[in-house]
Amino acid sequence: MPEAAPTVEVAAGLIVRTGKILIAQRLSNAHLGGLWEFPGGKRQAGESFEACLMREVMEEMGLTITVHEQIFSAEHHDAGRHIWLRFYRCTVLAGEPRPIGCEAFRWVAPAEISAYPFPPADLPLVQQIASGQRLIS
């Protein structure tokens, strides 16, 4: 019987300021390098999704954030893994984004987001945002 694909749990944030969403470009030497994503990363054992998101955004961009409600989830199979993503609405508490663990970052209007290439797992949320659905306030 084939082995089940390992599950990777990921927390990602819709960080919004003045109506624009913060996106980050993956490092060029990383898996899916060069694509854009919502800031976040893999959950460690025993870590809540909210704590994971706060840690990852600090490590990648130097931001202190508040994590609010979960607004979307998605599942995706990629490279022999089952990826389970949870997206949370977030606000910045302190700091300005810096590209510490990412290639670059942008604040983009919802209408502009589909101009950026995202990994397949993020596309359902990107399409909802681009279609004008009110996922953000």
Image (spheres, helix red, strand yellow):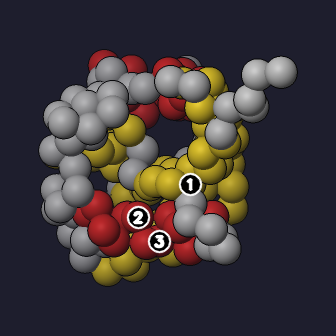
Residue hosting label 2: 56
Question: Toward which corner of the image does residue 133 lie, by quadrant?
Answer: top right
- Residue 11 is marked as 1
Query: In the image, what residue type sits under mark 3?
Result: Met
How many numbered circles does the render carry? 3
Count neighbours of disc 2 (C-alpha within 10 A) and say few if under 14, some if 14 to 19, many if 20 or more.
many
Question: Mark 3 or 1 closer to N-term?
Answer: 1
**Residue at the extreme front:** 1
Query: In the image, what residue type sits under mark 1?
Result: Ala
State yes or no: discs 3 and 2 in contact (Cβ < 8 Å).
yes
Residue hosting label 3: 54
Q: Is residue 35 above or below residue 66?
A: above
Query: In the image, what residue type sits under mark 2?
Result: Glu
Count neighbours of disc 3 (C-alpha within 10 A) and say few if under 14, some if 14 to 19, many if 20 or more.
many
Position of 12 compared to 57: left or right? right
- The residue closer to the viewer here, 18 or 67, is 67
Secondary structure under the numbered disc 2 in the rendered image: helix
Question: Mark 2 or 1 closer to N-term?
Answer: 1
User: Which percent across, then down, holds residue 81?
Assistant: 59, 32
